[in-house]
Amino acid sequence: MLFCVNGTLMRGLALNANLLNAGARVKAHDPIAMGKVKLLRHTASGRDVLLDILRGGEYFGSLAVPGRRGYTETAIAQTDCCILQISLSNFEKILSLYPDVTVKVLQAVGQRLQDSQEVIKQLSAYAVEQRIAAALVRLAGKMGEEQQDGTLIQLSFSRQDLAAMTGTTIETVSRVMSRFSEDGLISTGRKWVAVNDLGRLEQIAKEGAVN
Amino acid sequence: MLFCVNGTLMRGLALNANLLNAGARVKAHDPIAMGKVKLLRHTASGRDVLLDILRGGEYFGSLAVPGRRGYTETAIAQTDCCILQISLSNFEKILSLYPDVTVKVLQAVGQRLQDSQEVIKQLSAYAVEQRIAAALVRLAGKMGEEQQDGTLIQLSFSRQDLAAMTGTTIETVSRVMSRFSEDGLISTGRKWVAVNDLGRLEQIAKEGAVN
DNA sequence: CGTTCCATTGAATGAGTTCAATAGTTGTGG
DNA sequence: CCACAACTATTGAACTCATTCAATGGAACG
């Protein structure tokens, strides 16, 4: 979407393609050609916060403002990945040579800013149950594989991940998901979730659970 | 910073300058020439979340990805303001004509994405006291006026605003700030705060209060 | 000088965390 | 193929931090 990896825009550039196994730590600001990457931040207390999950075609890393050093995010390959690597100077060269690319990048970053602000709203003003519902809806839309009886969110996706996405604990996620499961909204197992009733999940995300 | 309002880049463009009183609602995606604007989102439950406070020179509004309609944010003038208005089509024209501007916009948006992600981390993993300390540090850096005995955060800035920034309630903000005040970290009054001990506030933001 | 808005403080309540124990799943090596 | 270890998930009970409800205190403003 962002970088036209198979297309023309990147042709002729000095790109290194890196193949990574799931769990590997990804460095630098690079576009993803294939696979899924978790974007997270560590806290002083050792807790991780899961900011985003990026798919093939998306870009990560600090769109470095010159003069700012150091990566504030950590990226971890969640599936086996192919990461394209591009140096900062080459990246800047592209931006100055191809305005269209810059505009695309801007749009993508703008979209992610919007999304981030939505998450901020969620964390600020919504109950845990609503945040978890919202996270499931988001994941289903972004990562879900359509199945006959619902949308499957596969990828090695644990309670731990959901907790880190919604700013809560594994135990609470487990409790809430048990409830959702009892109500027939989702089916769940070790490292997978299937969304059965997207509509009601969306409703819970917006309005909270029915009392 | 972002748009060189007094400079060359905007010259000759069809810009409307709007003068607004404090409290007025600001529409559309526009650069701010002067004044301060609160950027917020409403929740279904009627609670407001304060996403950012923008100063003269900053840009706000959805960097609309084509095909996405509607503004998800609300902007409110916090002081009297001069807002420059630019149509989306003109904005796109600028971006395609002046690559340098696009890069600057990209950097600014990238920076705000970073900041947003930091807030997400805060909301996810830190206690209220730490978040309030962090918010004060951020505001002091961004809005503070240096004084002999500390940094003054003036602008009509209430407990309500701080609560909406940190995802908590007026009462809790009041309690925490009373504590900070007793410990000599800040001085405070109606609609103003002065930071007296930035270092210790930063420490609290990172590590939590000393027991 | 009263009205209105903003801030403070107290007490009760509750949502979510924490600690702890148990149960199910996956993978490994004998 | 089974037994064991390692990991992930579930569930319970006690506790705690922050919210909520409520009442009071000051500042600003007409």
Image: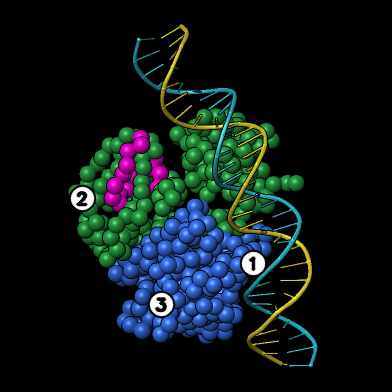
Chain colours: A green, B blue, C cyan, D yellow
Residue A141 in view of the camera: no
- C-alpha separation, residue under disc 3 versus residue under disc 2: 35 Å
Q: Earlier in the sequence, mark 1 or mark 3?
A: 3
The quadrant where residue A93 appears: bottom left
- Element type at mark 3: loop
Q: Is residue B99 above or below residue A89?
A: below
In the image, B29 versus D3, the foreground residue is: D3
- State which quadrant residue B148 falls in: bottom left
Please say whether residue A32 is one of the residues in the magenta stretch: yes
Q: Which residue shows up at 52% across the image and 29% down it?
A: A190
- Residue at figure coordinates x 62%, y 38% from the top left: A175
Residue tagged 3: B57
Would you say residue B165 sits in the magenta stretch? Answer: no
Chain of the residue under label 1: B
* Picture coordinates of residue A86, whole percent (x, y): 24, 50
Do the CB atoms of the residues marked 2 and 1 lie less than 8 Å apart? no
Which image quarter is the N terminus of chain B in?
Answer: bottom left
Query: Crowdedness of circle 1 by 10 Å Cα count: few (<14), some, many (20+)?
Result: few
Residue at numbered disc 2: A13
Residue type indicated by callout 2: Leu
Q: Nearer the viewer, residue A181 or A110?
A: A181
Q: Residues within 10 Å of mark 3 (few under 14, many from 20)?
A: some
Q: Amino acid at mark 1?
A: Glu
Residue matched to label 1 = B171
Stretch of the chain drawn in magenta? A22-39
Dots 1 and 3 on the same chain: yes
- The Cα atoms of the two marked residues, 2 and 1, are separated by 56 Å
Amino acid under disc 3: Gly
Q: Looking at the image, which residue is at 47% across and 36% down?
A: A157
Residue A30 vs residue A16: left or right?
right
Of all chains, the one bearing label 3 is B
Circle 2: is it few (<14), some (14-19), or many (20+) Cα within 10 Å? few
